[in-house]
Image (tube, rainbow, N blue to C red):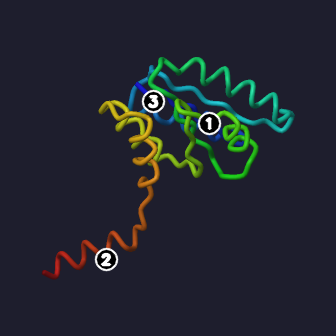
Amino acid sequence: MVGIVLISHGEMAKGMANSATLFFGNNIPQLEYCCLCAEDAPDDFGVKMEEAIAKVDTGDGVLLLADLFGGTPCNQAMTRLGEKVDCIAGANFPLFLELLNSREDGLNLEELVETGKNGVADVKVLLQTVDDEDED
């Protein structure tokens, strides 16, 4: 199973991990989070993230889910990308839940990244599509 590490400014990653327990129970396997605090140096955060990656990596790879592109958590993730480590920036709770579900279906790292990239929806467009189908 692909490991997931949530990374964020402040405690967003911790909150997402805690909220996911409402859907997946208290013991979500291969899930860690790293929160960048105001007093953390970027390199110190990177060390915490490496430790989290090591905890969740069982050989199938690790997906880092960052809060935003260009911030310290994502920048630190970029230096650790490779064949077995990937990153998606723009974390949100529905995307995270979709990744957890898809991971349980046995998707590999590359397939999880694709799922994540397609994990946002333009609600207005979706509603318009439903309205158009109802008119037919």
**Above or below: residue 55 compared with residue 23:** above
Name the foreground residue: 60 vs 14: 60
**Above or below: residue 76 compared with residue 55:** below
- Quadrant of res 42: top right
Q: Residues within 10 Å of mark 1 (few under 14, many from 20)?
A: some
Q: Residues within 10 Å of mark 3 (few under 14, many from 20)?
A: few
Q: Which mark is residue 81?
A: 1
The residue to which callout 2 is attached is 128
Q: Position of residue 118 (x, y in %)?
A: 41, 55
Q: Secondary structure at mark 1?
A: loop
| Circles 1 and 3: CB atoms closer than 8 Å | no
Q: Position of residue 90 (x, y in %)?
A: 58, 52
Q: Position of residue 12 (x, y in %)?
A: 63, 41
Q: Which mark is residue 94?
A: none
Cα–Cα span, label 1 and label 3: 28 Å
The three-letter amino acid code for the residue at tag 1 is Leu
Q: Which mark is residue 21?
A: 3
Q: Secondary structure at mark 3?
A: helix
Between circles 1 and 3, the one closer to the viewer is 1
